[in-house]
Amino acid sequence: MKAAMSKNVFCTAVLSLAVILGGLQTVCAQQNSGSSAGGPAGVIINHYAARNFTAGAIPAADLERIIQAGIRAPSARNLQPWHFTVVQNQNLAKKMVSDNVEGNVLIVVSAAGDGKTNGVQILDCALAVESIYLAAQALGYGSRIYTGPMDSLNKNLKAELSLPSGYSAVALVRVGKVQGGVDAVSAASSRKKTEDLVTYKR
Ligand SMILES: Cc1cc2nc3c(=O)[nH]c(=O)nc-3n(C[C@H](O)[C@H](O)[C@H](O)COP(=O)(O)O)c2cc1C
């Protein structure tokens, strides 16, 4: 009788834990995907370029994971031509993105060359940029890619950013907190029609 009772208590405890974990997983998936569609492809399909960043620090462990996503990006012949400059200093950040909010981090991706004509390296850097952009959203942050500030950055800020000698910035990714509950699908701009973009040769 006593054994049966403790077995019941054990089963109830395991069941409760499973329910709590299941619920947590759903909440995390919703937060992490930032969208209604979860699952591994959720962030990739439903990403959006964040517009309204809010103040707030990004914990170092999250930032490290986001940077690792860039480092792990694929590159031609695995040359990994990139350098990542992680700008947390707000004065410096505002020189690149004038409306930067306290706590936002700008990750500048640079490579050897002028940042414009070093073809395959730019493609490699673009993949690292995309990985950073998506990893940030997978962790529940907002992110946005910028190339607009590159000309001025490469002209005026290379030394202040300590870019490696001979490198130019290709793009930067802004990562930061955003209002919770943003519906990524409707927050994103519309896309061209699939039938105008895709050709199947069957
Ligand atoms: C290569 C590249 C450069 C971009 N440069 C800028 C930029 O300089 N400033 C900016 O506000 N957004 C920039 N964006 C963000 C785009 O405007 C945004 O991704 C696009 O409008 C789609 O928005 P959505 O994802 O919200 O639909 C850039 C995006 C890419 C991919």
Image (tube, rainbow, N blue to C red):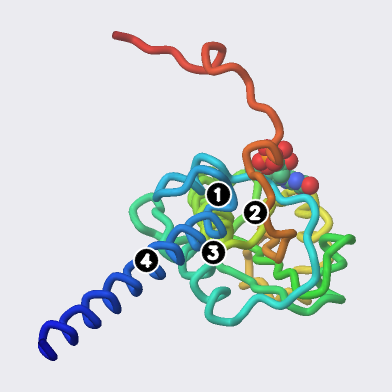
Q: Residue at x 71, y 74 (%)?
A: 87
Question: Residue 89: horizontal and vertical position, in percent?
Answer: 78, 79
Q: Is the C-beta of the residue carrying label 1 under 8 Å from the nearest atom of ligand 1?
A: yes
Q: Hey, which quadrant is residue 47 in on the image?
A: top right
Instruction: Residue type at mark 3: give it.
Output: Leu
As measured in the structure, the alpha-carbon distance from the residue carrying label 4 to the one carrying label 1 is 41 Å
As measured in the structure, the alpha-carbon distance from the residue carrying label 3 to the one carrying label 4 is 23 Å
Give neighbour class at mark 3: few <14, some 14-19, many 20+ (Cα, 10 Å). some
Question: Badge 2 is on which residue?
Answer: 170
Which is nearer the N-term, disc 3 or disc 2?
Answer: 3
As measured in the structure, the alpha-carbon distance from the residue carrying label 1 to the one carrying label 2 is 8 Å
Q: Disc 1, disc 2: CB below 8 Å?
A: yes
Of circles 4 and 2, which is in front?
Answer: 4
As measured in the structure, the alpha-carbon distance from the residue carrying label 3 to the one carrying label 2 is 24 Å
Q: Hey, which quadrant is residue 201 in on the image?
A: top left
Question: Residue 35: horizontal and vertical position, in percent?
Answer: 58, 47
Q: Hey, which quadrant is residue 177 in on the image?
A: bottom right
Of circles 3 and 1, which is in front?
Answer: 3
Q: Is residue 202 above or below residue 110?
A: above
Which is nearer the N-term, disc 4 or disc 1?
Answer: 4
Question: Badge 1 is on which residue?
Answer: 126
Which is nearer the N-term, disc 1 or disc 2?
Answer: 1
Which is nearer the N-term, disc 4 or disc 2?
Answer: 4
